Image (cartoon, rainbow, N blue to C red):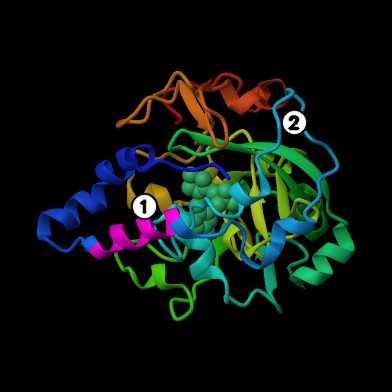
Amino acid sequence: MDKIHPSEITPERLYFSRRKFLAGLGLFAASTVITSACKLGGKEPGPGGFCDSAQAGATTDELGAGLTACNDIINYNNYYEFTLEKTGVAELARDFKTSPWTVEVGGLVKNPRSLTVDELIRKYAPEERIYRLRCVEAWSMVIPWLGFPLGKLLKDVVPDAKAKYVRFTGVHDPKNMPGQQDRYFPWPYIEGLRLDEAMHDLSILATGLYGKPLPVQDGAPIRLVVPWKYGFKSIKDIVRIDLVEDMPDSFWMSASPNEYGFYANVNPEVPHPRWSQSSERRIGEASRRPTLPFNGYGEQVAALYAGMDLRKFF
Ligand SMILES: Nc1nc2c(c(=O)[nH]1)N[C@H]1C(S)=C(S)[C@@H](COP(=O)(O)O)O[C@H]1N2
Ligand SMILES: [Mo]
């Protein structure tokens, strides 16, 4: 298992504006840090043996990079509904109930639908997609998802001519998601895509990884995966998908509008206001890799943004 040295995590934590704010008020609990440091040192990888029987159909992505180890994918997560600590999600999420689960698909459509995840899986037969995931915090993984094109579902509900965007809503369950008791954030998690981005074949709804149903910490039972955008666009635990006329305000646009935009296409030339985006730390690898425009999917997706100033539409 990839050992994450505290010094690698520190910059994000140090500069995270809310934490600075809380630290200033003396509200930042030192115990949080100590607890997670202990977990890092002592915890066995993988809850419930998920990875023991995990299997992917390939060993690399199409660029020849090896898959990220299963234990790293399920033990290093961003999932603010549970915690801000990447290595603490798996444990906090262990008992979260993800079945039965219904997804409402509606808004500006001819055939609104309410479908359980079981129904979605039966209907759209998830297949393996090996995608790079590039977090805006400059770490990355290669993940063998099981998923199906979002566009298939959208076609079936028949968007109205007025529909220009798709808005995704995550579950709101503060009783069972301790991070949602933190009222600093605009819960529930919201994300959005332009309709043509959502219809692109690379955009999938994922229901599994490494050949098995999604672990809770990776967004069970159903999440979006849009591999050419920063990871925060790939919203977990979706309960609603709405076709809408206006550009949705996402969770991160609301929480920190100067740092996070709607498009969030991976772009090594546009630094985050607080760090460079020109390279990334691939989890499990010793040295950094250069970050690729559109996370290496430019051939497939650059045409979606023809004529747009990609520095302005961040
Ligand atoms: N609902 C929800 N979705 C989310 C997040 C989150 O906090 N809540 N974090 C995002 C971020 S920042 C990243 S990098 C990816 C991480 O996915 P993973 O934990 O499966 O690697 O999920 C994204 N989707
Ligand atoms: Mo992220």
Residue 310 to residue 81: above or below: above
Picture coordinates of residue 22, whole percent (x, y): 18, 57
Whether tag 1 and tag 2 are in contact, CB under 8 A, the answer is no
**Given the image, on which type of amino acid does mark 2 rest?**
Asp
- Residue at image position (52%, 38%) is 230
Q: Between 38 and 161, which is closer to the camera in this rendering?
A: 38
Residue 236 to residue 227: above or below: below
Picture coordinates of residue 106, whole percent (x, y): 67, 65
* Residue 40: in magenta span: yes
- Residue at image position (31%, 46%) is 13
Label drawn at residue 229: none
Q: Of helix, strand and loop, which mostly describes the magenta segment?
A: helix
Based on the displayed image, in which of its 4 quarters is residue 144 positioned? top right
Disc number lying in front (1 or 2): 2
Is the residue indicated by label 2 positioned so its CB lies within 8 Å of ligand 1?
A: no
Which residues, given as a range, are shown in magenta? Answer: 31-41
Q: Please give the residue where the numbered disc 1 appears in the rendered image.
A: 254
Q: Report crowding for label 1: few under 14, some 14 to 19, many 20 or more residues within 10 A (C-alpha).
A: some
Picture coordinates of residue 62, whole percent (x, y): 77, 26
- Residue at image position (38%, 37%) is 8
**Given the image, on which type of amino acid does mark 1 rest?**
Ser
Q: Quadrant of the C terminus?
A: top left
Q: Relative to residue 263, is residue 50 drawn left or right?
A: right
Q: Please give the residue where the numbered disc 2 appears in the rendered image.
A: 61
Residue 150 to residue 141: above or below: below
Q: Secondary structure at mark 1?
A: helix
Q: Relative to residue 69, is residue 307 drawn left or right?
A: left
Picture coordinates of residue 18, whole percent (x, y): 25, 53
